[in-house]
Amino acid sequence: MGQHFAELAFTPLVKRQQEIHGSRRQYQRIEEFGESSNRFGDNERQFISARDGFYMASVSETGWPYIQYRGGPKGFLRVLDDRTLGFVDLRGNKQYISVGNLQHDNRVSLFLMDYVAQQRLKILGRAELFEGDATAANWIAKLKTSERNEVRERAFVIHVEAFDWNCPQHITRRFTMEEMAELHLRNEP
């Protein structure tokens, strides 16, 4: 866990709960001596580029949290540099809850899962939306993937503030059809 992630996530009430439940000393050491870099390394880059989906949380004007799944081909969530991510937002159910929420508060939390390897990466950042102008067209062209017949509405650029790898405990292994086929081929005589 990085120091900055701990600074953002461990509010006074969280720290109080850590004290009550006996984990405060461990996390205090992380705050004091943990990794100080908030930059993606090779491990994070490879993990992110292999994902075909992630969960993104935002907060509404009324304070309600909202989480939405974003999916696409592997690598649709792009690492633009060691502190920036981007993806093209395709037209979906036309509710625009995340888009509306981000007009109020640009903070997002991303939750990336690898169910097979039982790994998860949590990312805190600030989202910037590009839609309806030449700048948006440039971002969409830069970030587009191979989806055909999809309406590309906007580009998201996420400026990463902190990230944390989470323990694998309680992650149920799940496999996509593609992963099952790969396992089957490996196990054939």
Image (spheres, rainbow, N blue to C red):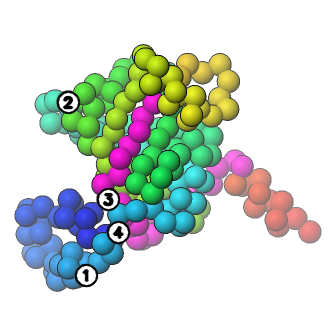
Q: Position of residue 14 (x, y in %)?
A: 13, 64
Q: Amino acid at mark 1?
A: Phe
Label for residue 162? Answer: 3
Label 4 sits on residue: 37
Q: Residues within 10 Å of mark 2 (few under 14, many from 20)?
A: few
Q: Which mark is residue 33?
A: 1
Q: Quadrant of the N terminus?
A: bottom left
Q: CA distance from mark 3 to mark 2?
A: 21 Å
Q: Are marks 1 and 2 in contact (CB under 8 Å)?
A: no
| Three-letter residue code for mark 4 | Ser
Helix, strand or loop for disc 2:
helix
Q: Amino acid at mark 3?
A: Ala
Quick check: 3 above or below 134? below
**Residue type indicated by callout 2:** His
Which circle's residue, 4 or 2, is located before the other in the chain?
4
Q: For this rendering, which residue is in front, 160 or 73? A: 160
Q: Earlier in the sequence, mark 4 or mark 3?
A: 4
Residue for badge 2: 104
The answer to if 156 sits in the magenta stretch is yes
Say above or below: 117 vs 141. Answer: below
Q: Is residue 173 magenta?
A: yes
Pick the residue in front: 78 or 1: 78
In the image, the segment drawn in magenta is 154-178
